[in-house]
Image (tube, rainbow, N blue to C red):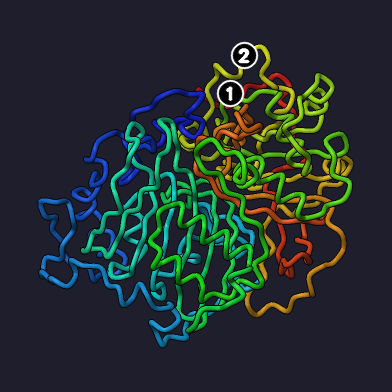
């Protein structure tokens, strides 16, 4: 737990400045040290610890050793294990196994919360329920923090794995993809693009016999996030066919997912396999942030402007800054300004945030934006206290700024007593609903593959819901910047989340190509959220 205290707000690195700390892989903190040593930083330490954990879980561990290059090799010595297996990488997963013991769990999509310490509760989800090691054939795993020992104990050694991870904070050009044959594992390093860039995407793409599972969680690949903190996730299972599906050429979800994985440097031989999945029932819009300054054709592809574009495409009536409330739950904060919150509110309503903001606009944002972040009191009274809040970060120097929008803040209190939240989610609803009629369920509403579902509701949505990796920061969503060609958006982080249209009860509304049926949003916070009323935010 002590290692978690070293986590700081690198997601808002543009405001926080340079940070040089070890990366979390085997229990260190999240912000990367420089140099090529980082690329193999955890393999030597990982080997023995992984085997001990695997022995405990399976009683079938094999000893391994590390060669001089840092690659893990089997102690038995298998030359074939030192090379990738193209035959696997170029076939649809559905042809790799005849097993029928594992069926789709989320055919209609599911928005859920992670299980925390305590008795098992079928309403909540453990990592092992998303990632079933006994049937998983291939997987892409992406996160900001990765504990290799923990992850390798939960995925079979022979399973083909692509681990998308950050490199050193000071390294502008990460190395190419690295293959570690002892674990049939590839380490993938997305481009940094700028000095203070954070690879913050949480994503699971999992090939099982006969179907593909795509999940976007807010949790990192560490035990703390899946056991002690509350996190949210969206997941959906998509049938696989032996041959590519021609409709994927026009499926927006398929195109977006392929583009995102390509930008993250996943090999084309793997992204090509997405063509075998049937994405016709994809129930969400993908909202992506990519580091850099974006203008022209890319202006509405990323960050805040991607959010505005998706909201417009949902055709939600009556969304306007003066009549809607944007509520954002976040686990990290930076140097937020009222002007920026005003732009976010306009984007949340599908409006053009480029327009110059007036004092009247900013007054509207003070009234219609709510930021849920825990107070010091809430953290200290939680089950794990301050040590459990190591990944909930805020620097007090921002809070003390004269123009910091303190009036927008509300206390983040989970409906599960004593639990702290690492979830990132937003909901935009009519102000009257947000203040007096908030009905989004506090616990997940699960529809399994055997559940009889009602057809997707075709009533008009009244708002939208988001969950994913974006914190409520400029680095995550971007800030508008002048450009020679007009408007541009400047973004520091790699981020990913999902957006769905909802009715007053949180039910995802069908239509416009979205499956909808059975999918429901979840909002795990006590509402209405209490005002700070003199309380202090948690932070350093």
Task: Residue 335: give its label.
Answer: 1
Measure the C-alpha gap from mark 2 to mark 1.
Answer: 9 Å
Is 249 left, or right, of 405 in this rendering?
Answer: left
Q: Quadrant of residue 491?
A: top right
Is 151 left, or right, of 45 in this rendering?
Answer: right
Residue 350 is situated, as x and y percent measured from the top left of the image, at 77, 44
Taking 497 as reference, is 397 above or below it? above
Comparing 389 with 298, the one in front is 298
Residue at 41%, 88% (x, y): give it: 98
Comparing 417 with 373, the one in front is 373
Taking 362 as reference, is 105 above or below it? below
Comparing 152 with 320, the one in front is 320
Task: Residue 411: give its label.
Answer: none
Residue 379 is situated, as x and y percent measured from the top left of the image, at 56, 32
| Residue placed furthest toward the top | 402
Local SS, label 2:
loop
Of the two numbered discs 2 and 1 on the same chain, state the one appearing first in sequence: 1
Is disc 2 in contact with disc 1, using a CB cutoff of under 8 Å?
yes
Residue 122 is situated, as x and y percent measured from the top left of the image, at 60, 65
Task: Residue 401: give its label.
Answer: 2
Comparing 53 with 385, the one in front is 53
Residue at 22%, 51% (x, y): give it: 43
Q: Quarter of the image containing the N terminus?
A: top left
- Crowding at label 2, few (<14), some or many (≥20) Cα neighbours within 10 Å? few
Is 168 left, or right, of 49 in this rendering?
Answer: right
Q: Quadrant of residue 199?
A: top left
Residue 293 seen in the current view: yes
Residue 244 is situated, as x and y percent measured from the top left of the image, at 51, 78
Residue 230 seen in the current view: no
Local SS, label 1:
loop
């Amino acid at each position: 737990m002590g290692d978690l205290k070293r986590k700081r707000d690198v997601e808002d690195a543009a405001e926080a400045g340079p940070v040089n700390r070890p990366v979390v892989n085997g229990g260190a903190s999240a912000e990367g040290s420089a140099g090529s040593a980082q690329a193999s930083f955890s393999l030597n330490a990982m080997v023995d610890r992984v085997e001990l954990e695997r022995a405990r879980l399976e009683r079938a561990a094999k000893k391994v050793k590390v060669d001089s290059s840092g690659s893990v090799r089997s102690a038995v010595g298998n030359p074939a294990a030192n090379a990738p297996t193209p035959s696997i990488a170029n076939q649809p997963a559905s042809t790799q196994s005849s097993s029928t013991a594992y069926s789709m769990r989320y055919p209609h999509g599911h928005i859920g919360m992670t299980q925390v310490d305590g008795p098992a509760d079928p309403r909540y989800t453990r990592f092992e329920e998303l990632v079933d090691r006994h049937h998983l054939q291939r997987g892409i795993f992406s996160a900001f923090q990765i504990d290799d020992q923990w992850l390798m104990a939960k995925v079979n050694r022979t399973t083909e794995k692509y681990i998308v991870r950050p490199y050193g904070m000071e390294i502008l050009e990460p190395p190419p993809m690295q293959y570690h044959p002892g674990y049939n594992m590839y380490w993938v390093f997305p481009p940094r693009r700028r000095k203070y860039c954070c690879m913050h995407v949480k994503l699971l793409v999992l090939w099982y016999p006969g179907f593909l599972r795509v999940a976007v969680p807010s949790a990192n690949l560490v035990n703390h996030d899946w056991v002690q903190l509350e996190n949210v996730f969206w997941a959906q299972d998509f049938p696989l066919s032996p041959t590519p599906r021609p409709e994927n050429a026009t499926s927006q979800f398929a195109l977006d997912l392929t583009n995102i994985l390509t930008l993250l440097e996943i090999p084309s031989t793997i992204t090509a396999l997405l063509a075998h999945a049937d994405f016709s029932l994809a129930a969400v819009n993908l909202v992506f942030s990519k580091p850099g300054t974006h203008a022209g054709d890319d202006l509405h592809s990323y960050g805040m402007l991607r959010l505005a574009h998706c909201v417009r495409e949902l055709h939600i009536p009556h969304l306007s800054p003066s009549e809607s409330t944007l509520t954002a739950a976040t686990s990290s904060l930076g140097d937020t300004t009222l002007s920026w919150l005003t732009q976010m509110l306009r984007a949340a309503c599908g409006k053009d945030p480029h327009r110059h903001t007036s004092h009247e606009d900013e007054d509207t944002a003070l009234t219609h934006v709510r930021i849920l972040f825990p107070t010091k009191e809430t953290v200290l009274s939680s089950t794990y206290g301050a040590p459990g809040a190591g990944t909930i970060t805020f620097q007090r120097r921002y809070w003390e700024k004269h123009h910091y929008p303190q009036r927008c803040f509300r206390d983040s209190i989970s409906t599960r007593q004593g639990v702290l939240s690492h979830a990132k989610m937003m909901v935009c609803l009519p102000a009257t609903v947000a203040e007096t009629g908030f009905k989004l369920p506090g616990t997940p509403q699960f529809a399994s593959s055997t559940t009889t579902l009602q057809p997707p509701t075709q009533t008009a949505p009244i708002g939208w819901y988001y969950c994913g990796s974006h914190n409520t920061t400029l680095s995550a969503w971007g800030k508008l910047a002048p450009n020679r060609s007009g408007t541009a958006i400047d973004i520091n982080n790699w981020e990913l989340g999902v957006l769905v249209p909802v009715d007053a009860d949180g039910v995802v509304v069908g239509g416009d190509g979205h499956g909808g049926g059975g999918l429901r949003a979840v909002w795990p916070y006590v509402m209405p959220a209490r005002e700070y009323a003199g309380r202090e935010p948690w932070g350093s």
